[in-house]
Each structure stands twice: as C-alpha cells, then as structure tokens.
C-alpha cells in the first residue's frame, strides 16, 4: 500500500510525551532545511512506485529520504545511520517525527529495498531536490548553474586488497558453504588445511621467502580445484546461485597474472582494477565515476558510474562505496553527489543563522550605547 503519513502531520496530541519542537533549537541548520525541502513532492513522486491496495502501508517517504540524505552527508553505512538516528533529536525532527523516539524506525535492510524501488531515476530526483533547496535559501545562485565542469574519479568498492591466496581461499569457502546448505557431501572441505596454508603464505611473504609463499598459494589453488570438481560431479544440475558461484570460482581458478578482465572479489566480481597514476595509491579497485559540478560554488548537478574502465585524463577523489553490485555503484555515485550538496546546504543554513545572530547582537549593543548616552 501507499507509504504512511509523516507523524508531524498527525494533529492528535500525546499528554505523556514531549514534542521535539520543545526540546530542539529552532535555529539549527537541519530544522531550517526541514521546512524548505519539498517533502510533499517527493512523497507524491515516490508514492507512485507502491501498489495502492495490496500489502501493508509502506514506511514514510520522508523518513527514507531523510535517512539517505543523512547517510551520504556524514558518510555512514545503513546500520550506522539508523543507530545514530535514535540518539539524535535533530535527525528525528528532520525525518518528520513529532515526538522523540527511543527505538529504531526501520531495519537497515529496508533502505536497500527502498533504493531498488525508486531506481536510478529516484536517486537523480534526490540530487535535483538539493539544488532546488539551495536556490530557495539562496545558497545557490542561478548564474552559477550556467557553466559546469565535468571530470572523472574512481569510486572504490568496499573490498579487501585482492591476492591470489585470498581469492582461492574465499572462493573455496563460499563453495563449501553453498554445498552444505544444499546437502552435498564433499569428499573433503579443506577448511583446516586452507587456513594453515593461508597463514603460512602470509608469513612467508612478509619474510620475503617468496618460493615458500608461492608453494602455499599453489596448494590453495589445488584445494579450490578439487572442491569445484567434487561439486560438479555430485551436483550436475546446480541451481542459479550455485551455478553463478561455480562460474566465478572457475574464472578465479583459471585466471593468470597478465589476463584481462580478472576477478578481484568473490562477492563483487564486476570490480575493475584502475590505475590513475597516483603517487600514494598505484591501483584502485572499483569503477570510474563521471561528475558534473558548477564552475562557481562547486555544486554537484550530475554524477554517473561508468564501467569497463574507459579512458580519461583527469582525476578527482571519492570515498569508498559500500553498496553491492553495478546498481549499487550507480546509486552511490548519484547519492554521494547529493550528500555533498546537502553538506553545503547545512553549512549555508548555519552561516545564515549565525549572521542574523551577530547582526542582532550588534544592533542590541548599539541601542544600549544610545540609551546610556541619553
């Protein structure tokens, strides 16, 4: 069904609870922005993605939008932003709450499902709203939007630095877990031996004993190959998930050092190795992102994740991506731009309120001096 209404629109009072408006500072930047953002437009826009008659009422659109703005403004994960929401009354007021809540509003996985629901077009609407809000509070000038700069950067994925030994062990472990879930009895799972080989490879590599380290790596590759063949013999018609994992494991088992389109992560097989010529970081693992920002003010007006490692000659820095898959790369690129804009909106709102405070203070001092002279 359609999402629930924002609690602030409920006129019914609760005698045993204190409203948030009575305990927060009305001059806070988040309070000011909460009154400027067009929540009704976003509610109507995203409400069209819900079935009007079937299912239970969805989570409030304002709550989900606010959580995503806060997530990318402060660079938090889904779990961290939900946990921080319980402790921060300003976040709750910005999300449309009427009273202070002591429990988490949603499970963090609901944010993942909501992102899939609104799609990439919905993320672009969130970015568009930050620019519209900036124009309303005059943080963004209309003439600033007439000229933009386009550049590229690398969006790193939330993965460990890939090594052959880790990839062999991780792929084998995932196959063993999948086989256990499906009741496949393997001849040997190599859990104990793989752990010993992985620790030995790390220690030998640290001591620069590369021949012994390579020997441990070859052992780990052998264990992976045995598990792959054992599953293929005993489960000739695997389901879709197991088939996909077997395909990834076979590619990891067969890939060589100088091959192209290698796999660098078992759970994120689309990750690419990108060399941008940086002195402090030779290789980065993720995807490229093309961003468009205004020449004056640096407001982001567009962002797009680009895969297959196309050529570019310039670079910009971007934080690590926690979202899964190619769709997660696209969401993170657009919503990161929205988060950067929202951070500037908070700073602009705080500066505006601070200027008003100092003007009132100076005016009060001037009036005090005039009265004393009289």
Image: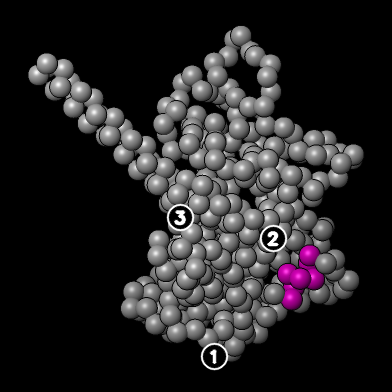
Q: CA distance from mark 2 to mark 3?
A: 23 Å
Q: CA distance from mark 3 to mark 1?
A: 49 Å
Which residue is at the front of the view, 74 or 261?
Answer: 74
Magenta: main secondary structure equals helix
Q: Is residue 246 magenta?
A: yes
Q: Which residues lie in the magenta part?
A: 241-247
Give the total number of marks visible in the rendering.
Answer: 3
Q: Quadrant of the C terminus?
A: top left
Does 132 sit above or below residue 79? below
Which residue is at the front of the view, 271 or 136?
Answer: 136
Which numbered disc, 2 or 3, marks the residue that appears first in the sequence? 2
Does 98 sit above or below residue 184? above
What crowding class fits label 3: few (fewer than 14 Cα within 10 Å), some (14-19), or many (20 or more)?
many
What crowding class fits label 1: few (fewer than 14 Cα within 10 Å), some (14-19), or many (20 or more)?
few
Q: Mark 2 or mark 3: which is in front?
A: 3
Q: CA distance from mark 2 to mark 1?
A: 38 Å
Q: Residue at x 42, y 34 (%)?
A: 28
Instruction: Determine whether the residue tagged by mark 1 lies in a helix, strand or loop.
Output: loop
Give me the disc on residue 140: 3
Q: Quadrant of the N terminus?
A: top right
Q: Tell me, yes or no, whether the two marked residues, 2 and 1, touch with CB atoms within 8 Å.
A: no
Query: Badge 2 is on which residue?
Result: 121
In the rendering, at what x and y percent does residue 293 appear?
47, 67
Q: Is residue 108 visible?
A: no
Query: Badge 1 is on which residue?
Result: 258
């Amino acid at each position: 069904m359609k999402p629930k209404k924002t609690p602030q629109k409920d006129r019914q009072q609760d005698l045993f609870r204190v409203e948030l408006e009575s305990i927060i500072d009305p001059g806070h930047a988040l309070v000011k922005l909460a009154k400027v953002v067009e929540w009704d437009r976003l509610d109507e826009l995203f409400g069209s993605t819900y079935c009007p008659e079937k299912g239970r009422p969805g989570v409030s659109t304002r709550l989900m939008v606010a959580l995503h703005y806060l997530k990318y403004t402060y660079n938090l994960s889904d779990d961290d932003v939900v946990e921080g929401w319980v402790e921060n009354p300003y976040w709750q007021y910005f999300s449309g709450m009427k009273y202070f809540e002591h429990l988490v509003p949603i499970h963090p996985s609901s944010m993942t499902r909501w992102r899939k629901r609104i799609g990439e077009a919905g993320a672009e609407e969130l970015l568009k709203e930050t620019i519209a809000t900036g124009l309303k509070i005059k943080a963004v000038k209309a003439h600033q939007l007439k000229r933009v700069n386009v550049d590229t950067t690398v969006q790193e994925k939330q993965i460990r630095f890939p090594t052959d030994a880790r990839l062999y062990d991780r792929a084998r472990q995932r196959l063993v877990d999948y086989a256990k879930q499906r009741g496949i009895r393997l001849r040997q799972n190599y859990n104990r031996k793989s752990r010993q080989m992985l620790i030995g490879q790390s220690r030998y590599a640290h001591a620069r004993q590369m021949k012994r380290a390579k020997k441990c790596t070859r052992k780990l590759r052998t264990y992976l190959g045995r598990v792959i063949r054992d599953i293929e013999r005993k489960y000739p018609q695997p389901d879709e998930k197991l088939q996909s994992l077997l395909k990834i494991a076979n590619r990891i088992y067969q890939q060589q050092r100088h091959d192209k389109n290698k796999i660098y992560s078992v759970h994120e097989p689309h990750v690419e190795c990108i060399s941008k010529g940086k002195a402090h970081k030779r290789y980065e693992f993720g995807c490229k992102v093309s961003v468009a920002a205004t020449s004056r003010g640096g407001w982001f007006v567009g962002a797009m994740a680009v895969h297959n490692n196309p050529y570019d000659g310039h670079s910009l820095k971007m934080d690590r991506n926690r979202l899964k898959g190619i769709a997660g790369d696209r969401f993170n690129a657009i919503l990161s731009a929205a988060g950067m804009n929202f951070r500037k909106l908070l700073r602009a709102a705080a500066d505006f309120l601070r200027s008003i405070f100092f003007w009132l203070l100076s005016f009060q001092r001037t009036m005090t001096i005039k009265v004393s002279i009289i």
